[in-house]
Image (cartoon, rainbow, N blue to C red):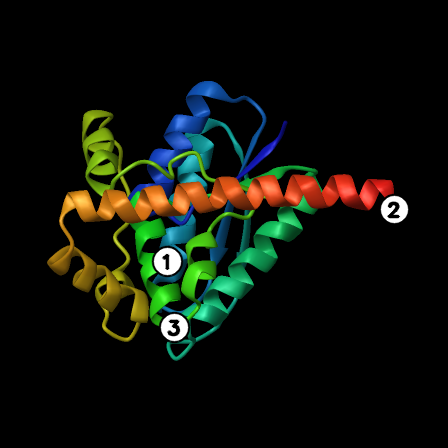
Amino acid sequence: MRYIIAVSGGIDSVVLLDLMSRTEKDLVVAHFDHGIREDSASDARFVEALADRYKIQFVCRREKLGADASEELARQRRYEFLRGVATDFDGVIVTAHHRDDIIETVAMNLKRGSRWRGLAGMSDGQIVRPMNSWTKQRIYEYAIRQKLEWCEDETNQSDLYQRNKFRRKINRELDEYQKLGVYEAWRKQRELRGEIEQEIEKFDGEV
């Protein structure tokens, strides 16, 4: 199996790359330079050097979405790129989404009124997320222990992005027990979705 690792240069994806490099041989590092920040090209150079250090093939696309680009547009263009790389290399996309990301996504979906369907976010079976049970704290501890280097994206602190506001609100209002409860609800919903999809495949095969 060939794995297409989405590496932004941030701590999450750098830890993912280090983990995958220890257990898998057939890897491709994919970096999408969205061009939202003026200095985003430096992240691309960092990731390219990182891939070279691990002796892994590097693929990159640069676009100029501009400072006014929305979160949704950046996400859409990134996944279009990743799916294209996965097709070209006949591989599977791997992302560094972790437990905190899942909790944020669930909270945002429910806030938008998606009700129980909001619990099914980030459960696409075509994308591998090996760190989905990791907390952000665990990621930091691993990076420090392994003496890894990463880039800090200043947009992660900007109030222009809805996810950043949700992240601060969640950290302020939910304790660890409550966060774990949200994660467990998501995990069960993902399992249920998988079971339903399997049954649908059986039905389609009988028609």
> Which element carries disc 3, helix, strand or loop?
loop
Q: Which one is in front in this view, the residue at disc 2 or the one at disc 1?
A: 2
Q: Dot 1, how many residues are within 10 Å of its Cα: few (below 14), some (14-19), or many (20+)?
A: many
The first of marks 2 and 1 along the sequence is: 1
Tell me where residue 21 appears, x and y as whole percent: 45, 25
Numbered circle sitting on residue 91: none
Q: Which residue is mark 1?
A: 105
Tag 2: amino acid: Val
Q: Which residue is mark 3?
A: 112
Q: Dot 2, how many residues are within 10 Å of its Cα: few (below 14), some (14-19), or many (20+)?
A: few
> Which element carries disc 1, helix, strand or loop?
helix
Residue 48 visible (yes or no): yes
Marks 2,3: beta carbons within 8 A: no
Q: Classify residue 170 as left or right of residue 188.
A: left
Marks 2,1: beta carbons within 8 A: no
Q: Which residue is mark 2?
A: 207
Q: Which one is nearer the viewer's eye here, 76 or 203?
A: 203
Residue positioned 32% across, 61% down in the render: 107
Tag 3: amino acid: Arg
Q: Which one is nearer the viewer's eye here, 18 or 133?
A: 133
